[in-house]
Amino acid sequence: MTLQDSHGRRFSYLRLSVTDVCNFRCNYCLPDGYECSDDTASLTVEEITHLARAFAAQGTRKIRITGGEPSLRRDLPQIIQAVANTPGIEQVAITTNGYKLTKHLPAWHAAGLTQLNVSIDSLDPRQFKAITGHDRLQELLDGIALAQTLGFKNIKVNAVLLRDYNLAEFDHFLDWIKTTPITLRFIELMQTGDNQDYFAANHVSGESIKQRLEANGWQPVLRRAHAGPAQEFCHPEYEGRIGLIMPYSKDFCSTCNRLRISSLGKLHLCLFGEHGYDLRPLMTVDKEAELELALQELLQKKTATHFLHDGETGAIQHFAMIGG
């Protein structure tokens, strides 16, 4: 069976948040740091196990573990192992800010992690600290080197495009991937409920970056199975690739293949939806069939597109809420 909405889109990719807590203070997400708004405990390993089984039974093949910052969960290796051991799941990915990456990565790898995404918004240590509130750039670069040693393939580095902070570094980023075999993904800044002024000052059109790449010989790459929304580009003179995530581009939602579960067990049909649907009561050993049916039924409520172009950001106040 497959999860399919009323618009004919199939969903084989789940983004699973395991906590909304984050220890970084990125100025585009949590400039004042994390503030707890709900003291309800996050999903347990047992609940995540039932959830992964239900999604896998409906055709999900890739699960990405997100936060907040997922490494703040002490039982993260057990979560990774539970997901990796789920029949039908082929890829287990994580998106992390890289906190203590060199310490954690061997255990994640041993538990079954297959793909690593690390957020690095600047290659200048001072600018990196200005954006994130932490002086940890070298630690992240060391973590990526360790990932390569451990045999991780298709390592991805995420950088949010910011006019006042890292746009001037674009050529520096390109120089880096000339000899570094990773996929560098530039993410177009998105408007949320609390960043209107910051968005107006820092938003950079992903389309302008795409035109710049194409003018310099970069060629589009075919999307892999279960891939996310990035448009990827390669160049014969570069070891690395470029990915562009452009939510304001035309037809961005037409290829949507991913759903989201919050750390409290709510299904979000869209990052910018108005609310989530509580599935936590169904994440038990005797209700997996009900959970699968609920997924099928709720998916029919998914709209054809988000409404970011109209300035409607839904219920999301910041991206740590459900992992971006």
Image: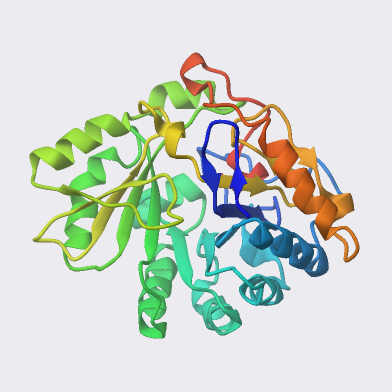
Instruction: Farthest residue to the front: give it.
Output: 1
Nearest the camera: 7 or 242? 7
Percent x, y for residue 15? 59, 52
Residue sitting at x 46%, y 56%: 226
Nearest the camera: 266 or 122? 266
Nearest the camera: 49 or 301? 301
> Visible in this render: residue 41?
no
Residue sitting at x 55%, y 53%: 13
| Residue 57 picture quarter | bottom right
Percent x, y for residue 40? 87, 50
Q: Quadrant of the N terminus?
A: bottom right
Percent x, y for residue 264? 79, 49
> Visible in this render: residue 142?
yes
How many numbered marks does the figure carry? Answer: 0
Q: Quadrant of the C terminus?
A: top right
Residue sitting at x 36%, y 26%: 250
Residue sitting at x 35%, y 50%: 185
